[in-house]
């Protein structure tokens, strides 16, 4: 199976700051479900940011979807991102837009027709158990509901790679279960690659997964 | 209400700037024709030993546009010489030549002095009268009004720009979150800025129409009834329909620069 992400001697850091991830070597294949864990400040989110081009590697190499993330051009990065599904701990919803408009953002960017957007929004909101909340605004929803909107948005365009940063961080059990179910299904049924940064791997997880951990020195290991 | 709130904060400074621009255009047009009438009403007097042509004068100073020789007989007539015909002819022959010189513009006092000095270099020229005191008082009044008006326009424009900078900060606050999220999901720069661009263009159009409307009313009410010579003679110069396009173009340029500066300053976290 082809690699979706390949890191070779990957070193990451912020400007005028020490290196956070040091000489990481790993590859993630199509259809893999990967958990990345590690203590606070170890660089989990930093590593995830580099996967969607928010942070450029300082050294080594990183390819995502076959694109070199060091040499990547702006246009190619936009194209890559339009095929990713990204979920954030703080949801990153657009508060002045309705739930439906937030969910179909990737489709709107890609220029899909209003009909397709509307149909897809209804289907996704049904999956995340938010049917009937299409016209609500994010701030009218609970944290768990907002995160489910975020997950629906990530799934809207059937991405080849889902990146999730602490998706269930502050959520109740019900919302967390809905989110894990959706991600499991995306991986199992659609062969989507899923990379999740989390503090804790869920107790009940129904599909095989890989587990990477980052230690205090910024080294990345595969646990199993 | 929300629409008004969203738009008024840009429309207000934009109208201030456009009013300044339109005042500048109108003032330039009307003062230009007033300057021409002052220029036409002014001439300097030169007395020379021998005949001089326009080229002779121009060889000393290029500001000289037209020359009119004053007839000696008329000068003598004015002097009311009660002498016989032969004596008058003898006297007329001994008189120098008198010329009235028109200049190519309404010159500054310094420029006028320079013209006088240049002409004095000619050994043929006996005397020059610039009527400087009358010229100076008109010129100074005119310059003062021009300066006061331009200072007011510049002041208005500066205030307008400060308000636009303030509005840019507001835009940054209101649109940054949406634009950052859209960038993460791969939206192009245009798509991210589309809402802001549309809003800014609407504001630019409203501002240009408002400013044009103000000047249209100004022209058709106050200016038409005005007794001010400078305005009475230039009613058509106060507002022209082509000004709408100038104002619209200027408004769009200003808002596009503002949008561009906001957009490039919004960076992904």
Image (cartoon, rainbow, N blue to C red):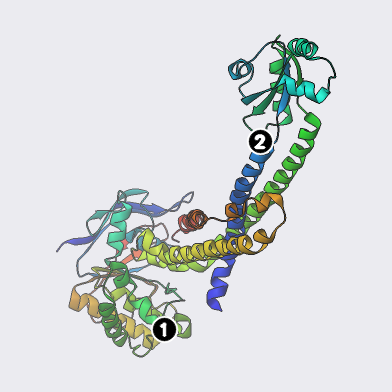
The image shows residue A51, relative to residue A190, as above or below, that is above
> In which chain is the residue bearing label 1?
A
Tell me the tag on residue B53: none
Whether pointer 2 and pointer 1 mark residues with C-beta atoms closer than 8 Å, the reply is no
Q: Give percent across and percent down for residue B116.
A: 72, 21
**Quadrant into which the C terminus of chain B falls:** bottom left
Q: Give percent across and percent down for residue A217.
A: 41, 57
Residue furthest to the bottom = A132
Tell me the tag on residue B40: 2
The image shows residue A99, relative to residue B10, as above or below, that is below
User: Is label 2 on the same chain as label 1?
Assistant: no
Q: Residue at x 43, y 65 (%)?
A: B198
Judge by depth and name the residue closer to the eye, B99 or A173: B99
Q: Residue at x 65, y 56 (%)?
A: B159
Q: Provide the residue designation for mark 1.
A: A144
**Residue A24 visible in the picture:** no
Is the residue marked by circle 1 packed among few (<14), some (14-19), or many (20+) residues within 10 Å? many
């Amino acid at each position: 199976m082809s690699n979706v992400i390949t890191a070779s001697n990957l070193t990451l850091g912020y400007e005028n700051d020490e290196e956070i991830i040091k000489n990481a070597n790993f590859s993630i294949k199509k259809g893999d479900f990967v958990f990345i864990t590690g203590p606070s400040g170890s660089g989990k989110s930093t590593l995830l940011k580099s996967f969607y081009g928010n942070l450029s590697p300082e050294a080594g190499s990183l390819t995502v979807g076959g694109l070199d993330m060091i040499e990547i051009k702006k246009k190619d990065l936009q194209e890559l991102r339009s095929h990713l599904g990204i979920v954030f701990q703080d949801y990153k919803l657009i508060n002045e837009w309705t739930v439906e408009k937030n969910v179909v953002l990737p489709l709107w960017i890609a220029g899909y027709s209003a009909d397709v957007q509307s149909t897809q929004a209804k289907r996704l909101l049904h999956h995340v158990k938010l049917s009937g909340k299409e016209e609500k605004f994010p701030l009218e929803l609970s944290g768990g509901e907002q995160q489910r909107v975020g997950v629906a948005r990530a799934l809207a365009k059937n991405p080849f790679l889902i990146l999730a940063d602490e998706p269930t961080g502050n959520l109740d059990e019900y919302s967390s279960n809905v989110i894990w179910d959706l991600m499991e299904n995306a991986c199992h049924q659609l062969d989507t690659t899923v990379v999740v940064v989390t503090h804790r791997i869920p107790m009940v997880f129904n599909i095989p997964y890989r587990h990477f951990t980052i230690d205090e020195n910024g080294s990345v290991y595969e646990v199993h | 209400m929300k629409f008004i709130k969203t738009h008024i904060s840009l429309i207000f400074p934009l109208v201030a700037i456009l009013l300044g621009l339109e005042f500048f255009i109108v003032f330039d047009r009307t003062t230009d024709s007033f300057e021409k009438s002052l220029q036409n009403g002014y001439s300097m007097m030169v007395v020379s030993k021998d005949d001089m042509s326009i080229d002779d004068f121009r060889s000393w100073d290029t500001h000289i546009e037209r020359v009119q020789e004053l007839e000696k007989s008329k000068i003598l007539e004015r002097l009311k010489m009660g002498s016989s015909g032969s004596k008058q002819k003898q006297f007329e022959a001994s008189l120098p030549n008198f010329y009235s010189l028109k200049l190519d513009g309404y010159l500054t006092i310094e420029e006028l002095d320079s013209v006088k000095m240049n002409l004095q270099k000619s050994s043929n020229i006996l005397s020059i009268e610039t009527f400087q005191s009358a010229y100076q008082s008109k010129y100074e009044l005119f310059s003062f009004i021009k300066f006061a008006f331009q200072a007011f326009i510049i002041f208005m424009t500066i205030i307008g720009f400060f308000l636009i900078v303030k509005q840019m900060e507001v835009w940054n606050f209101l649109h940054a979150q949406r634009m950052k999220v859209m960038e993460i999901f791969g939206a192009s720069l245009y798509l991210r800025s589309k809402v802001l661009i549309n809003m800014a263009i609407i504001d630019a159009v409203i501002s240009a129409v408002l400013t044009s409307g103000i000047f249209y009313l100004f022209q058709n009410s106050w200016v038409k009834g005005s007794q001010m010579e400078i305005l009475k003679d230039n009613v058509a110069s106060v507002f022209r329909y082509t000004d709408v396009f100038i104002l619209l173009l200027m408004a769009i340029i200003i808002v596009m620069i503002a949008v561009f500066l906001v957009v490039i300053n919004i960076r992904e976290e």
